[in-house]
Amino acid sequence: MSTTHATSETFDRNARAALADPVLHGALRNLADSFVVRRRNAIASAGDWEDLRERARSIKDETLLHLDEYLERFTENAEKAGSTIHWARDGKEACEIVLGLVRAQNANMVVKAKSMAGEEIHLNEALEAAGIEPVETDLGEWIIQLAGETPSHIVVPAIHKTKQQIADLFVEKVGIEKTDNVDVLTQTARRILRQRFAEAQVGISGVNFGVAETGTILILENEGNIRLTTSLTKTHIAVMGIEKVIPKFADLDVFLKLLPRSGTGQRLTAYQSLITGVKNNADDIGPDELHIVMLDNGRSRMLAHPLTRQSLACIRCGACLNACPVYQQIGGHAYGSVYPGPIGAVITPQLFGLSKAKQLPYASSLCGACREVCPVKIDIPALLLHLRSEIAEGSTRESQPTRKLGESIAFRMYSRIWSRSGTYALSIRAARLAQRFVARNGKIGKVSGMLALLVPPLGAWTERRDAPVVAPKSFREMWREKKK
Amino acid sequence: MKVALFVTCLVDQLCPNVGMATVEVLERAGCDVTFDERQTCCGQPAFNTGYRKEARKFAERFIEIFETSDAEAIVIPSGSCTSMVKHFHEVFEGDAEWRERADRIAAKTHELSSFLVNVLDVDEVGAISNGKATWHDACHGLRDLGVHDEPRRLLNKVDGLEFVEMENADVCCGFGGTFSVKFPEISAGILDNKIEMIEKSGADTVVACDASCLMQIAGRLSRISSRVQVKHIAEILASQE
């Protein structure tokens, strides 16, 4: 698929390509039909859902407000339990730390658990460039690794693929007989991945939550591959965004109720690995070394602003993707970022720069479905509006200008002319005259050619929709007549 | 009750009958309706596209105009524009005086169906209509203002009208202001799903509280020559036939 290397700078083109892909459309239908419904059913079993959301958000707010203190406490306790803490300012630094650790073990391959932080820093590319083979062990991640693609969803990385596409991929890449039996496909993956686990010396994972009070990391999953990645290997490297820390062990109660229900519509994931340091006795199960790489990569910048700070409350459940009408249309690759969907449209420009992702904050109808399902009550529409204003007004933080000249002139004219009733009325009279050239039977059909070029919004609107005409008599005229 | 009408620019120019219907319904519910002809637009297109300075101009005008009114409430036949008024304070960041004025105006501003049911405590306005209608929840009305039951109660009390729920009534129609022309293909894709649900409901009329969603939905229904009509809730409530 050509969308593999899509960047967020070409969002409009990526989106058009996605819309023209009928196979993708079929795959995305599952989202609304299964995930949305499953989530709705699962939250019904969680008691007072609104209260849980409130509590989760207040825990996150408190943590983010005093992040330095909680990070200090987390690292202190993690080290006490035998973990080694590393700090990475950006993705490059994080990759270098990981490479150093893998090289120290003389390993030429690593098993990997699904990790968005790992995707964010492009860890696989870095490992490959250093001659180390990364083996993804999450089924979905393994599939897209075989296909040479990137994840299109935070939780379900291969959601864009149909069963048939996956079967064809297995035939091509691992040489099985042609089949459409899902059991055969999963058994094949299991057989191959078990072998890789047996060979591996180093396992790399992400982190869902890091508990400051105990120095524990928690990782959730359904396939058992994370358990193997983090326990069969001698060295476990966990890449953890600095915003993943929470104050107390008891806080997990709230988040464990929210995350699986919001993400996959489960009451609880099949596995929850709580890892506190390394093993104490040689006979215990578990790695000899646990390295936690604390990743900043733009996060501390997001802390500064009271509005954007809430972006860091995200627990990566993916519920906003599933609920988003835009995501449902175009899937994740069109966003050209490891973080797609509504939360991706918020995080991507903040992490990687507005000028690199200036279309993303506009890729939303602001319907608010994302805010409604967000388990930590992130006001995504408000954040999108904030980013839009930074783009439109020209952010000073950006190296490249983000303003669009034509658009800013149009809005200046709109505000000059339309904020006064006299000029407003004049402009309507002008529109009434102008529409005579295009209106037929009280509506405007498809506008093309020169006119569509001269008035791009009209061309864009009428491609698939008729446009209404200005009424012969406005309300204010009717009102005047009524009052006579 | 004395009520100041903000009719919205879309209704003023594109569907003035919705404005007249709003006046009719409010008067039938016992209101004394005033309309200040200095009003234009709430400025939402600018605000939603990120042009806050431009949006502020509209907000200032709106506040100045409605501050001169002695009406107890400002009523708007649109969830979206009502929601914009509730957001006015955001364009006055760091300006305490304007923020306070914005908040005072916002506190007395109501979307039409919510005003009828929650302020006037009226869910029957003597409307008579026929046929089968379904309701589209406009996003801002639903999620910013919490308007959900109010229009359904009103529609269920319309004499002769059969009300049916469509599936995914609360899913966006894909309009989204400038979104609809910035990304017309995505917007139309979302719209197609909405049209499918409307057609599937078996209704002959789709009703909403926002001229913007109705313009989007009507634009597609007209293009595909559907038999389904669009109506603003004010038109149904004003109907006497």
Image (spheres, rainbow, N blue to C red):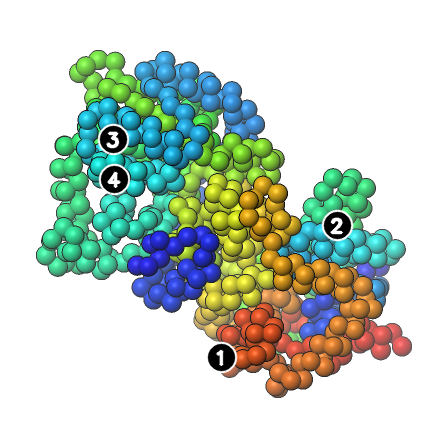
Q: Quarter of the image for the N terminus of chain A: give it.
A: bottom left
Q: The residue marked by circle 4 belongs to what chain?
A: A
Q: Which residue is mark 2?
A: B106
Residue A106, x across and y down, in percent:
19, 26
Residue A249 found in image quarter: top left
Q: Which residue is mark 3?
A: A203
Q: The residue marked by circle 3 belongs to what chain?
A: A
Q: The residue marked by circle 2 belongs to what chain?
A: B
Mark carried by residue A467: none
Residue A168, x across and y down, in percent:
19, 58
Q: Residue at x 37, y 16 (%)?
A: A79
Within-10-Å neighbours for mark 2: few <14, some 14–19, many 20+: many
Of B87 and A173, which appears nearest the observer? A173
Q: Residue at x 45, y 57 (%)?
A: A10
Q: CA distance from mark 2 to mark 4?
A: 58 Å
Q: Quarter of the image for the C terminus of chain A: give it.
A: bottom right
Disc 4 versus disc 3: nearer the observer: 4
Of B153 and A130, which appears nearest the observer? A130
Disc 3 versus disc 2: nearer the observer: 3
Mark carried by residue B224: 1
SS at circle 4: helix
Q: Amino acid at mark 3?
A: Gly
